[in-house]
Image: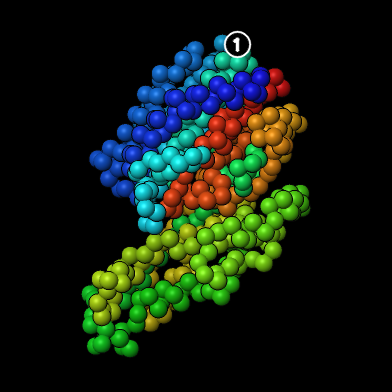
């Protein structure tokens, strides 16, 4: 496969066929089900699925089938299947699974003037808007890679592409689909996930691990209605003070250190060496490349500690709160309750159910002043990549050198892709390539999210070459 020809052809496909549709996709407020309980009635997820389905169905790939699968009460799943270049098909064939999602995070505030979550804006290499990079580009990258492998005459195995619509909610619907479609999926020997990140836009970055997630909802109730703060305060306990104290049971507020041993695990010696090498490559950028305000600085003091903190240490972020009015609307009222959404990131090897149970037990035990405290959690497993087969290690280096100019680099990610943990258990003999386009400043989930278009094109080219290497192995 000619690297120059692959790059030129995929550039034309992206500019002419993909990016205009991605603009339309960004315009759809396809919030994940955790953020839109009425998603079925609103129809935005269905609109996003139909947009991608119609684009995919129009691709001229011999034998391509495109189907929207629906299970009762669950978000839809887009399934695309392409027979092998030699015509073989069916679940008994050698199979490559390619994965992505198209549901989105909420809007978030703070978008700069001229940008917005549902307003696609192209500025040079950047396509701004919610979901383009996380992870709307994935379906287009996967199918264009298969198409390019065919166009180049390169061999490839049977490919099945799964694009889900609940990933941003922790993929609660996907396991049911994998079970329902087990006879159709078969046993993939290579799984390519396009929902991860990259440490810079100059290298191909392959994800070696993902942190798990325990999403905890903590609520403190003290009275049945709001009370005048001048009358009740000092006698009626503050729900916020109680919540603040409960959090001190699980996190050191001075350092951010998680205090529960059930949430900790260490990397293996081999993985630690890999983390060291990546920390040396990235250097102080791990500490400084953040939009700090004023004199704010990173918690870690050196690159290695920073990368370990991001990928192998547990952490807590309070990502939402109910019962608290805005400053402009807050009167002198002692509020009756405070509810917080707590996002615990877990080391890849920690069991999220064990962690979640430990968190809940610590938070609800013996509440101060006898307050009503409730806590619940949803967990998603982390994931650690198996050792690369020699053919795949060589193929990654070759493809990266051809399209990024240097060999592949490896890094753990601080985020979670629950589907990877499930697939790792279900297909223990499969090889994994987890990569993506979420690099510096891409700001997925936050304001000013953007897709770095050249990286998306290069990732498509790399996947096309990996498909050929897999078939030749």
Q: Is residue 133 left or right of residue 259?
A: left
User: Residue at point 69% right, 42% down?
Assistant: 409
Q: Position of residue 430 (x, y in %)?
A: 64, 32
| Label 1, residues with CA under 10 Å away: few <14, some 14-19, many ≥20 | few
Q: Nearer the viewer, residue 473 or 290?
A: 290
Q: Nearer the viewer, residue 242 or 283?
A: 283
Q: Nearer the viewer, residue 468 or 111?
A: 111
Q: Position of residue 120 (x, y in %)?
A: 38, 40
Which residue matches tag 1?
86
Work out whether 90 lies above or below 39.
above
User: Residue at point 49% right, 51% down?
Assistant: 443
Q: Is residue 92 visible?
A: no
Q: Nearer the viewer, residue 58 or 168?
A: 58
Q: Is residue 323 left or right of residue 467?
A: left
Circle 1 — which element? loop
User: Residue at point 49% right, 12% down?
Assistant: 62
Q: Residue furthest top?
A: 87
Q: Position of residue 36 (x, y in %)?
A: 32, 48
User: Residue at point 70% right, 19% down?
Assistant: 472
């Amino acid at each position: 496969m000619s690297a120059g020809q692959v790059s030129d052809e995929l550039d034309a496909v992206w500019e002419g066929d993909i990016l205009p549709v991605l603009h339309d996709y960004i315009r759809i407020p396809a919030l994940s089900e955790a953020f839109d309980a009425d998603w079925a009635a609103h129809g935005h997820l269905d609109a996003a699925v139909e947009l991608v389905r119609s684009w995919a169905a129009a691709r001229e790939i011999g034998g391509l089938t495109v189907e929207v699968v629906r299970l009762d009460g669950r978000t839809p799943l887009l399934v695309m299947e392409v027979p092998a270049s030699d015509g073989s098909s069916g679940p008994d064939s050698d199979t490559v699974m390619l994965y992505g999602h198209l549901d989105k995070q909420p809007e978030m505030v703070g978008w700069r003037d001229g940008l917005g979550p549902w307003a696609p804006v192209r500025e040079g290499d950047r396509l701004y808007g919610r979901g383009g990079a996380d992870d709307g580009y994935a379906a287009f990258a996967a199918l264009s890679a298969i198409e390019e492998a065919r166009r180049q005459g390169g061999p490839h195995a049977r490919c099945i592409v799964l694009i889900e619509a609940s990933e941003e909610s922790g993929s609660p619907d996907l396991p049911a689909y994998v079970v329902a479609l087990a006879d159709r999926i078969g046993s993939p020997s290579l799984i390519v996930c396009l929902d991860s990140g990259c440490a810079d836009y100059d290298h191909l970055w392959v994800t070696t691990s993902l942190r798990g997630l325990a999403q905890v909802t903590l609520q403190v109730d003290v009275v049945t209605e709001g009370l005048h703060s001048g009358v009740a305060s000092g006698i009626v306990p503050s729900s916020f003070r109680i919540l603040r104290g409960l959090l001190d049971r699980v996190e050191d507020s001075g350092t951010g250190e998680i205090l529960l041993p059930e949430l900790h695990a260490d990397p293996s010696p081999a993985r630690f060496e890999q983390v060291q090498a990546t920390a040396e490559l990235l250097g102080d950028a791990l500490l400084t490349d953040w939009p700090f305000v004023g004199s704010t600085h990173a918690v870690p003091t050196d690159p290695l500690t920073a990368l370990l903190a991001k990928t192998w240490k547990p952490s807590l972020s309070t990502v939402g709160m109910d019962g608290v009015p805005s400053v402009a609307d807050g009167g002198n009222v002692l509020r009756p309750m405070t509810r917080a959404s707590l996002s615990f990131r877990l080391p890849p090897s920690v069991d999220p159910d064990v962690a979640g149970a430990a968190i809940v037990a610590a938070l609800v035990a013996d509440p101060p002043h006898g307050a009503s405290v409730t806590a619940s959690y949803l967990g998603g497993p982390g994931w650690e990549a198996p050792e690369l087969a020699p053919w795949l290690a060589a193929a990654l280096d070759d493809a990266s050198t051809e399209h990024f100019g240097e060999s592949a680099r490896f890094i753990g990610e601080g985020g979670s892709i629950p589907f990877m943990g499930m697939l790792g258990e279900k297909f223990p003999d499969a090889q994994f390539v987890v990569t993506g386009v979420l690099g510096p400043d891409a700001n997925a989930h936050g304001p000013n999210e953007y897709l770095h278009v050249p990286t998306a094109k290069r990732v498509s080219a790399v996947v096309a070459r990996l498909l050929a290497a897999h078939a030749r192995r």
